[in-house]
Image (tube, rainbow, N blue to C red):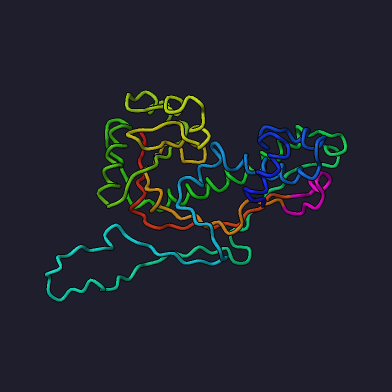
Amino acid sequence: MYSFQEVKKIEEKLGRSLNEISLKEVVLTDQTVIPIKVHELVNEGAKYGDPSIGRRICLVHQMDAPLKKYPKISPNAFNVYHVGEIGRSPMEAIEFDSYTLDCTGNRGYHKVNIAVSKAMVKDSQFDVIETNLKRAGEAMGWHMTEEIIDAMDANAGLTVTTGTTNWDRLVQAIGEIRSAGFTPNAIIIHPQEEASLLKLNQFITAYQLDPTGEIRKTGQIGQILGIPVYSTPKANAGYMYVIDVNNAYALGIWQDLEVENYDDPLEGLVGAVVSMRYDYTLIWSEAICKITAV
């Protein structure tokens, strides 16, 4: 991957932001920049819009080793006591549970084919190649999102099945999360549930929040009671989820998006693949409330 500083230097050289320049323009201007543009397109597909939701609904760890253990701290881990209490020491040690993220060997090693053919390169089909690069990134993002939401569905520690309307059930689920000591800060739904939420006076759309469309690029469709709402077909139809992003699931990224088998700016795209190495695991099941939609 290329650092932020490397990309900025290239953009200064080109006089424009890299995302404003097409692959064709880069090829005709400076072929040494092609690999950076290729990575930018893959990242655009995976890290913006709906495919990026998986990254946004987890506590993300950028791993500095393929196997890492992190402390699992409950909301009630720390006890406040009066200094006059007998038999209590301010230096009393607290023992925490932990969770492990494992990307050793081939664990969490994911790949997707870019699907660029020799004919595409030979015929200078740069628009098609550009689209394929974005789609490969999107595929990785969609896959991650589906895996994480399926895991949340299977391991939700709280459930809500009663209530006349989806509003009733959402409010109840928010209360369940708070009662468990967590902070509800994301709602995940399937597009089939959008219509009932959009009718609510309490629902504020992403474009009402930000007419520029920047919030929509995060995968949010809006907010309810200040809580971001994410809608994705990778969620399970008929259900909604209220979660505490920082305590539900952890996502460990050992190797972020890279293009493998890529040794030539253009011809090297034939047979190249997008790869990523990550792991995810449950932190607290009580930070997830699964709602049966009305």
Whether 178 is drawn above or below 193: the answer is: below
For the point 38% across and 51% down, the residue is: 156
Which residue is rendered at x = 12% and y = 74% of the image?
86
Considering depth in this image, is 235 or 228 the residue closer to the camera?
Answer: 228
190 left or right of 47 in image: left
For residue 202, what is the image quadrant?
Answer: top left
Query: Which of the 4 quarters of the picture holds residue 87?
Result: bottom left
At horizontal 67% and vertical 42% (from top left) the residue drawn is 40
- Is residue 269 highlighted in magenta? yes
Q: Is residue 116 magenta?
A: no
- Drawn side of residue 219 relative to residue 244, left or right: right
In the shown orientation, is residue 214 left or right of residue 164? right
Q: Of residues 78 and 198, which is closer to you in this image? A: 78
* Residue 280 in picture, x, y percent from top left: 50, 56
Give the percent coordinates (x, y) of residue 8: 65, 43
Note whether 77 is above or below 153 in the view shown: below
| Residues shaded magenta | 260-272
